[in-house]
Image: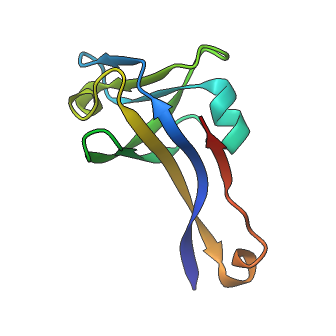
Amino acid sequence: MKTIILKSKIHRAVVTHTQLDYDGSCGIDSDYMKEVGIKPFEQIHIYNLTNGERLITYAIEAEAGSKTISMMGAAAHKANVGDLIIIAAYGNFEESEIAEFKPKILRL
């Protein structure tokens, strides 16, 4: 049996940009993505600390070093520029993998 466990988290990221006219996703500074092991187009969960909204979308790479956190498409309705969010990615783990696993967490 597999268990879903937190794999990666970017904690207290600040939304820097929103854009409604887009297919939908979350642009994340590629340096942040590499640091926590989030892959392009990987499913992510976003928890908005400012307004309580939650959503599931996918990650796309923003320019390295830009500190960009961009909510695009329908996700732009769930956050405003300046909102604090948590970005989380989860993985399916075998029971034997769980005891040794530690999620990668970036606190901003």
- The reply, left or right, for residue 96 in relation to residue 71 is right
> Residue placed at 32% from the left, 29% from the top?
24
In the rendered view, tell whether residue 20 sits above or below residue 51.
above
In the rendered view, tell whether residue 42 sits above or below residue 74.
below
Task: Report x, y in % for residue 61.
Answer: 57, 25
- The reply, left or right, for residue 21 in relation to residue 104 is left
Q: Quadrant of the C terminus?
A: top right
In the rendered picture of this protein, how many numbered marks are placed on residues? Answer: 0
> Residue placed at 65% from the left, 49% from the top?
105
> Residue placed at 72% from the left, 63% from the top?
102
Q: Quadrant of the N terminus?
A: bottom right
In the rendered view, tell whether residue 4 sits above or below residue 68.
below
Q: How is the image coloured?
A: rainbow
Tell me where residue 82 sits by quadrant: top left
In the rendered view, tell whether residue 101 sits above or below residue 27.
below
Task: Report x, y in % for residue 68.
Answer: 52, 19
Tell me where residue 76 sits by quadrant: top left
Q: Residue furthest right?
A: 100
Task: Report x, y in % for residue 80.
Answer: 28, 25
Task: Report x, y in % for residue 84.
Answer: 40, 35
Tell me where residue 11 sits by quadrant: top right
